[in-house]
Amino acid sequence: MSQKKGYITRQAKRLTDGEINRRRFVMSALSAGVTLPTALSLASKAQAMTPKAGGTFRMATGYGSTTDVLDPSTSENGFSQNIIYTRGNHLTEVSNTGELIGELAESFEPSNNAATWVFNLRRGVEFHNGKTMTPEDVIATFNYHRGEESKSAAKGLLAAVTEIRKDGDNQVIFELEGGNADFPFIVSDYHLMIMPSDDGETIADPNSRVGTGAYLLETYEPGVRAAFTKNPNYWKEGRGHFDAVELLSVLDVTARQNAIMNGDVDYADSIDPKTVALMQRVPTLDILEVTGTQHYTFPMRLNVEPFGNYDLRMALKFAIKRQELVDKILLGHGAAGNDVPVSSAMPFLNTELPVHEFNPEKAAEHYKKSGHSGPIQLSAADAAFAGAVDAAQLIAASAAEAGIEVEVVREPSDGYWSNVWNKKGWCACYWGGRPTQDWMYSAAYTADTEWNDTAWKGTESADRFNEVVVAARSETDQTKRKDLYWEAQRLLQDDGGAIVAMWANFIAAHAKALANDGNVAANWENDGNKVAERWWFA
């Protein structure tokens, strides 16, 4: 049996390499004892796995805002992130098998106990305007995010960088204030797309359409549409197969699902779990479901009353029926959260944390201690995630059982990320997650990040948390590192303002005509938001 399987596998490779045609492959399979239907199926599968060039790929995404801009530093939703990955590249990337690999950096290595990192750049990479990428472009890009006046969401991620310099014509060296074994993950952050400098020192125009990616941005309507054409000089082998790409922001989940079911688009993300069973019956569609690091949260900002009150925060944490949210909002396509942004797929999950589940007695006890009275506003829009408004209503209902009045404020979807999130006291939110704890904390929880959406700063626990995160970052002893991360999770779960309510699977629908190499990344939805670069029409 193993010999026959090996023979057919070799013949399949010859088919995809063009050494034999489909008829020859089928005849080979038949001679090996395979039935004709099976042989035809094997031939189709093998050929589908072979990348083909051509076609216009149309994608509908559930994210986007008319306040979006092209500047990668302020990207705050999936629409903008898709644009970044479609038109640009980074020093490193998380591959579709989940490994961290070099992208614009061919290789990278640490020294000085991981406090120094050397990135060896690929030679001959061109920006869309014909300019050859240099170390100066990389340095100018990172300094743009690090600048004193920078509003970059990645500024906190780079807070430990003390110096960036070049060595020769293809090396960039980062000096950190302390060791950081996860630094190569950090430089893959989507905000850190490498941009061209104008004078070797500063970024020419952060809102420029120019990148080094597989596609050239031709049309850009913020929060509406982006259209791309193939980059004929793309440096990455085996990527960027489509002739053109069209990205559409379709915030309404019903409209998005109708678009994919009617064939108006080839791919739609953020599919409502309620309609998965229905869409699975559409003969032209496949459902893609990936378990990753995506989680749905309800951040409470400590700098907005009444959320600076510890007991009020604890009351709300115990006032939520998390499993009910998973059952009714996700329809089982996920798991209950426990107020830390760390899943079982990530290293050093604290398995001894107390479980935050619905406890009306504890909620009422903490609420009484808080001294608060009157309604507590919770802002939500389905721009946060499919079913966010319904989830907020369920939270209001369960909180009422504990004697807490929650007033749900339905916000407009357009402008939600600019006008509500990171501004109003309590709202619905989603996080795609990050592959490491340090990266997740640096993105959303440390005191120095722009995206600390709970404004968790200044409390004794918050101060200790920031100390622990820094210590864990440079700790090379894995036992000690685990202890530090376990402490960080205890501090965050108890005192922090984040209600991490649910871990949600990534769910998308796509035309059966689309194909990939069989591996789909889970670091972000939509194959790491690189469907446009990695997939093709079979």
Image: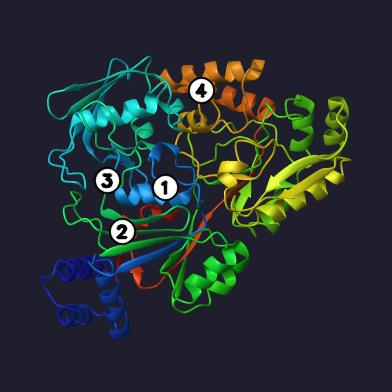
Residue found 31% across the figure and 37% down from its top: 205
Three-letter code for the amino acid on which mark 4 is drawn: Asp
For this rendering, which residue is in front, 402 or 253? 253
**Distance between the Cα atoms at labels 4 and 3?**
29 Å
Residue found 48% across the figure and 54% down from its top: 223
Residue found 49% across the figure and 32% down from its top: 443
Of marks 1 and 4, which one's residue comes earlier in the chain? 1
**Distance between the Cα atoms at labels 4 and 2?**
35 Å
Q: Is residue 256 visible?
A: yes
- Image quadrant where one finds the C terminus: bottom left
The answer to whether the residue labelled 4 contacts the one labelled 2, judged by CB atoms less than 8 Å apart, is no
**Distance between the Cα atoms at labels 2 and 3?**
12 Å
Three-letter code for the amino acid on which mark 3 is drawn: Val
Circle 4: element type: loop
Three-letter code for the amino acid on which mark 2 is drawn: Phe
For this rendering, which residue is in front, 354 or 136? 136
Q: Which residue is mark 3?
A: 210
Of marks 4 and 3, which one's residue comes earlier in the chain? 3
**Distance between the Cα atoms at labels 3 and 1?**
15 Å
The answer to whether the residue labelled 3 contacts the one labelled 1, judged by CB atoms less than 8 Å apart, is no
